[in-house]
Amino acid sequence: MNIDDALLGRAKTQARARGLTLGAFVEEALQEKLTAAPRQRRVPVPVFTGGTGLVPGVDATSNRGLYEALGEE
């Protein structure tokens, strides 16, 4: 097994700080990783499939018409 030197150094430091052997630390880390909850599946995003456009009677070329449609005068 090949382990990056910097990662191995960090693992040794962590193991020493916790009073564990390197083997025990690696075993614990692997156990945590393998029993961790799986990532959640992506939630489907609802997509609007209805028609588009303005409500009949709204004049999009007039600021006044748009304000009236919004209920703002």
Image (cartoon, rainbow, N blue to C red):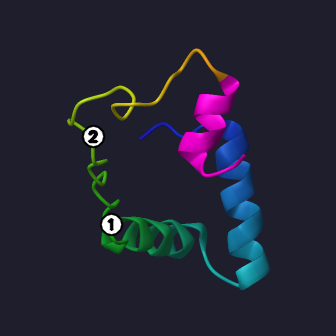
Find out whether residue 16 is within the magenta segment: no
Q: Is residue 54 above or below residue 19?
A: above
Type of amino acid at the residue the image marks with label 1: Leu
In magenta, the rendered stretch is 63-73
Q: Front-most of 62 and 47?
A: 62
Secondary structure beneath disc 1?
A: helix
At 50% from the left and 65% from the top, the residue drawn is 26
The secondary structure that dominates the magenta segment is: helix
Q: Nearer the viewer, residue 31 or 24?
A: 31
Direction from residue 56 to residue 29 in the image, left or right? right
Residue placed most toward the observer, 7 or 69: 69
Identify the image quadrant of residue 33. Answer: bottom left
Left or right of 45? Residue 11 is: right
Residue tagged 1 = 34
For residue 19, what is the image quadrant? bottom right
- Residue name at image x 56 percent, y 72 percent: 25
Whether 17 is drawn above or below 29: the answer is: below
Q: Which mark is residue 48?
A: 2
As shown in the figure, which amino acid type bears the numbered disc 2?
A: Phe
